Amino acid sequence: MKLENKVAIVTGGGKGIGAEICLSLAKEGAKIVIAEMDIESGKNSQKRIIENGGDAIVVETNVADEFSVNNMAEEAVKKFRKIDILINNAGIRHINNILDHTKKQWDEMLSVNLTGPYLCCKAVIPYMIKNGKGKIVNFGSIASFMGRPDRVAYVAAKTGVLGLTRALAVDLTGKNINVNTICPGLISTPFNQKFAEDPVHGEAWGKETIVGRWGVPSDISGAAVFLSSDDSDFINGSEIKIDGGWLAAKTRKGELEN
Ligand SMILES: NC(=O)c1ccc[n+]([C@@H]2O[C@H](COP(=O)([O-])OP(=O)(O)OC[C@H]3O[C@@H](n4cnc5c(N)ncnc54)[C@H](O)[C@@H]3O)[C@@H](O)[C@H]2O)c1
């Protein structure tokens, strides 16, 4: 097992990509702290981990709130005595054209998607320094690399995550802490269920990828395990795009269908 005796915090670990990452890390031997706002989903994720022979706790957490995030780190250390891995997965998205996009939506999205990872890193880094090693995985998106319609704050926040990752990696020089970003493409989760199921756009979006389909959470969790393990010790301040090739190709309708 690649993560035996490691302790991992996964924000937003109750649903979607986060829940799958929790299970994958646990199967590699890590003890899991599910940092969730939605306690019910956190408990479901915990149950799945325990049924698979793992160990996990749920800590009610709002990543946008500094007090809550500090409590998350303290509860993790109280239960498991250290923190080795932080997966900054929690994220939200409002879809609204700039003309209707409210300042409240902007503030919310920046707070959860960009300030959240900053606060979580700030809270756990002292424990990682004490350990002599640490792994941080932030979550960007294909929206970290291009504009997407009606998503000004989401694109701005997810582009900011790449900068946060690089700046933190540099700040932590000599501390043996790796900070990297995973940038998913279209992944079928509660986050975008309505698009995945849309009879017109759902299939068409899948075909925008080279692979020709939407992704599923298990398409992402392997990379999270890799970036949490010693196998990725020479990867720092970097990002992995997991998008079925969406960003690698600009295609016209029908071009990839042969
Ligand atoms: N699904 C996709 O297609 C896709 C694409 C690109 C990037 N992403 C990114 O991947 C990450 C996970 O996405 P997902 O599709 O699994 O989302 P999801 O909505 O299915 O799950 C997100 C989880 O985060 C939790 N959460 C939300 N706000 C929180 C907060 N303030 N504090 C703590 N927990 C909070 C939710 O309760 C939920 O359980 C997000 O950062 C998202 O932006 C997803």
Image (cartoon, rainbow, N blue to C red):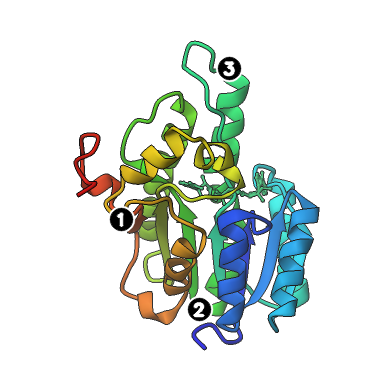
- Please state if 157 lies on the left or on the right of 253 as rendered: right
Label 1 Cα crowd, 10 Å radius (few <14 / some 14-19 / many 20+): some
Q: Is residue 193 above or below residue 94?
A: below
Secondary element at tag 2:
loop
Q: Give the residue type at disc 3.
A: Thr
- Please state if 239 lies on the left or on the right of 220 as rendered: left
Q: Is residue 65 above or below residue 218?
A: above
Q: As rendered, which of 39 and 177 lies closer to the eye?
A: 39
Q: Which residue is mark 1?
A: 211
Label 3 Cα crowd, 10 Å radius (few <14 / some 14-19 / many 20+): some
Q: Is residue 126 visible?
A: no
Q: As rendered, which of 234 and 35 lies closer to the eye?
A: 35
- Please state if 154 lies on the left or on the right of 243 as rendered: right
Q: Which residue is mark 3?
A: 102
- Please state if 11 lies on the left or on the right of 246 as rendered: right
Q: CA distance from mark 2 to mark 3?
A: 43 Å
List x then y, in percent, for residue 13.
65, 59
The extreme top residue here reads 99
Cβ atoms at labels 2 and 3 below 8 Å apart: no
Which residue is located at x 69 percent, y 43 percent? 65
Q: Considering only order in the chain, which callout, 2 or 1, is on the residue closer to the N terminus?
A: 2
Q: Which residue is mark 2?
A: 132
The extreme front residue here reads 258
Of badges 3 and 1, nearer the viewer stands 1
Q: Give the residue type at disc 1.
A: Val
Q: Give the residue type at disc 2.
A: Gly
